[in-house]
Amino acid sequence: MRLRAIVSAAALLAVLALGPLSAAEAPKGYLLKVGSSEDLDTLSVFTASERAATELFLLVYDPLVSFDEKLGPAPCLAESWKVSADYLEWSFTLRPGLLWSDGQPVTAADVKFTYDALLESGLGLYAPFLAGIVSVEAPDERTVLIRTDKPKANMLQNPTPILPEHVWKAGLGKLEEFSDPRLVGSGPFSFTEWKQGQYFSLAAKPKHQLGAPKVGGIVFTVFANRETLAQALVAGEIDVALNLYPDQLPQLGKAKGVEIHRFSGNGFTELALNCWADPASKGSPALRDRRVRQAVERAIDRRAIVDIAFAGAGEPASTLIPAATPEWHYEPSAAELRSPDPAKAGELLDAAGYARKGADGIRLGPGGAPLALRLLARSDNAREVKAAQMIEAGLRAVGVGVELSTVDDGALQAAIDAADYDLFIWGWGGDVDPTTILALLTTGQIGGSNEPRYSNTAYDAAVERQATLLDPKERQAAVFEAQRIAYEDCPYIVLSYDGDIQALRSDRVAGMAPVAGGPILYANTNVNYLRAAPTGAASRGAAPTVALAAAACALVGAVAYLLTRKRAKKANWDAK
Amino acid sequence: MRRAFLRRLLGAALTVLGVLAINYFLFRVMPGDPVAMLVRNPKMTAEALARTRASLGLDRPWHEQFRSYLAGLARADLGSSFIFKRPVLAVIGERLLPTLLLTLVAEALAIAGGMLVGIVSAWKRGTKADVLGLGFTLLAYSMPTFWLGILLVALFAGRLGLFPVSGMLSPGLAFAPLAQRLGDVLTHLALPSITLALVLMGEYALIMRNAMIEVLTEDYIVTARAKGLSERGILRRHALPNAMIPMTTLIAMSLGFAITGALQVETVFSWPGLGRLMYEALKGRDYPLLQGIFLVTSVCVVGANFAADILYRYIDPRVRD
């Protein structure tokens, strides 16, 4: 009796825990199942900051111009565009007959509304893509005119999703709180539901200007740990697994039907050096000398860090732009490159005035104080902590004392904001356009993203200039120049261009291919979601497991019933 | 009796209030800025940061923020989560039921199993059954939760394929009808609840065995035996009720912490519970969400202790007077 009560209570809780069912109808066709460690944070373009949200927006909304499978500009809402001779006025022509998912037509006014709302509020991940735009006009239903103050080199690398004005105008003035729970959009998929911490799902639209998806829907499942993520792929519960680690490759390599894609991602892990010379800086004065910063780099063996600390996930790095965007990555010449060399590190430190050594082998500064640096690493990132230990050992070997502490992200951010650190390890992710990464270290970003508080007018000028050059060759020269200066000055020692691994069940889903030699999904474009097609191989159904569980429940119930009966009899006998 | 009840109720309420105030300031003393955590975005301008800060109310003086927090609390409004931009109650509510499902099922299994093992071990003290029971107990008690979880996944989900690997619902069933989803949730529940139950069971069995052994050496047990009562009767009527007193405390404490205590199991099995939510909130310095979760937790812990206090009066007549 009591057991039955417990079982029914559990079942009731399970029903409640499932929550309200989505009102959306089940999509017809194959459900593409993606597993990753990433979840949404909000459903609004103005407030979301997670990568998963930008991936969702790629699927439910459309930009004016999207990226193709080589990350070149591809017509999306706009079928064509042209720019004036002075490069200050752009004109985009929208495709005819575009519709929002609620049936209303997509017009140039929607584009103007979206850009104006982002530019005015400055909110969210997309507003910065619109930097330099002075006005947006919609002279007719299908024409968008955009004026800029200076030539805007990345006008066509602008993934800003276009929102329907008739839905979002209700949110003007309170965009921080407003959101559209249905995500009315013009993209190839429509949003169905989000169960925070569990999954979010989408259904394919039967028609789209880029061609209808071949799958019926997509579900993105959130995994809290990578071991079970890999297991789920092998077991066939999901079709694609993202953010895997190299130590999982042997296990995945043995599994049937699993195709592994290893690539160098568009992001890096860096050792930042506090080079702020301001009186307010609480960093070691030693690091304000470029020779000391270069000596730190000479004492570090990037290859060993990548191989040991990062378990081979990534490539030893040099300049700011990762090699994943080869047209923008500057490779230092043999003369410029500072390969690991403790002897050279020693020479640099001697020249900087740290030639004398104390009894413990630590170098002494001009004032007699030992040269000791504080190094912060993020406690929940084991690979970065390991790298920090290797850096500590490398620096000690050349006579630089290191005090290593591990802190959580919040505490590290606080130390950075207060300029109260000498060295720390963290990373950045880049965009297709190089401006994002280059702008990190500009003087204007001191107090913001310029964490080392580095300042060099030549660097600032090169970064500003590249953003206005529409000729690819000229722009590349400016991008290279900026990277060369930053490498020479050494505010960041970029340790590795981070590697990433995605794996997919090619026996279940065909058609997906790496975008520009990199990722399959989370690749700045939705082409692989549109190309993915089921192969027709049977997916493991849940039915056998359900039947098994039902059988197990029945068995337990029967045994429990027999036991309680037996006990009841005994009890009766006792009472007599 | 009634007065004692009211006094305890008042004490419990004061404790919760005290915890609330301490939490409020504790989170804010922690290094780390929620706005910076929220928008670690290379392209963010200073104005946009200031706007975000203002929209979260973080630009106002601390006493004003505290006052509006208390005022909101009085209206049962816990504020809005920084990360999720939704009311804290809604965010917590979505995670509370999965947590309760997992922990309550695990607790029920652990209490039943732990008591059984403990009683048998004590009753058969020194025999092979005791050695076996005690061995199992110590093993389970000292087992790292996450490791046990991964072992069970590798064996039952990976090798044998009997149960799903993780999560609460199969990805393929996101659009399935209710009955099918329900069955799926129950199969997903099996491994995490067994993992949690095994770990909890060790503690229960150990305490139960000790309490039982102590009781079995009391004079009244000898008396009962001398009166010619059956062994089973002695166990059920005379020994068990007295041995239950320490167990009640343990169960109450354990249930109180059950709300957030399953973090490791939730992480191994990707179970969408409160423990994981708390971790996310802490990482993002999401003050309102942290406060909300700690409020729920404190109410549960204080409530469970309060319930244990009241329950004592029924199971132990000596406390009643």
Image (cartoon, rainbow, N blue to C red):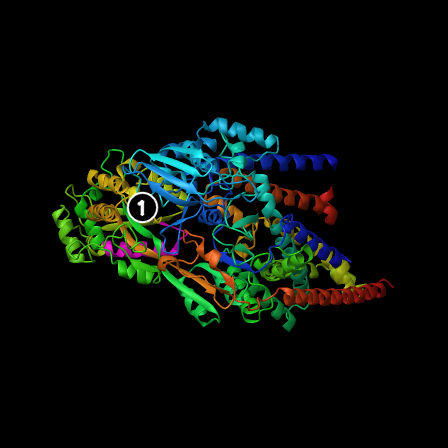
Query: Could you say where residue A341 lies in the image, as x and y percent from the top left?
Result: 18, 58
**Residue type pointed to by label 1:** Ile
* Quarter the N terminus of chain B occupies: top right
**Residue A255 or B90: which is nearer the viewer?**
A255
Left or right placement of residue A420 versus residue B25 in this view: left
Residue A372 in the image: above or below residue B218: above
**Residue A367 or A201: which is nearer the viewer?**
A201
Which residue appears at 48% of the width and 56% of the height? A530
**Residue B12 or A455: which is nearer the viewer?**
A455
Marked residue chain, label 1? A
Query: Could you say where residue A15 lies in the image, as x and y percent from the top left?
Result: 67, 52
Query: Could you say where residue A68 lies in the image, as x and y percent from the top left?
Result: 39, 53
* Quarter the C terminus of chain B occupies: top right
Query: Could you say where residue A22 lies in the image, as x and y percent from the top left?
Result: 63, 49
**Residue A413 or A397: which is nearer the viewer?**
A413
Q: How many marks?
A: 1
Q: Quadrant of residue A119?
A: top left
User: Does A384 lie within the magenta span?
Assistant: yes
Q: Please tell me how crowded label 1 is: few (under 14), some (14-19), or many (20+) other residues with Cα within 10 Å.
A: many
Q: Quadrant of residue B58?
A: top left
Q: Which residues are magenta?
A: A377-395
Can residue B53 be seen in this snapshot? Answer: yes
Can you name the residue that lies furthest to the left here? A351
Q: Secondary structure at mark 1?
A: helix
Task: Give the main secondary structure of the magenta stretch.
Answer: helix
Q: Quadrant of residue A458?
A: top left
Find disc 1 in the rendering and name its residue.
A437
Can residue B228 be seen in this snapshot? Answer: no
Left or right placement of residue B168 versus residue A35 in this view: right
User: Does A418 lie within the magenta span?
Assistant: no
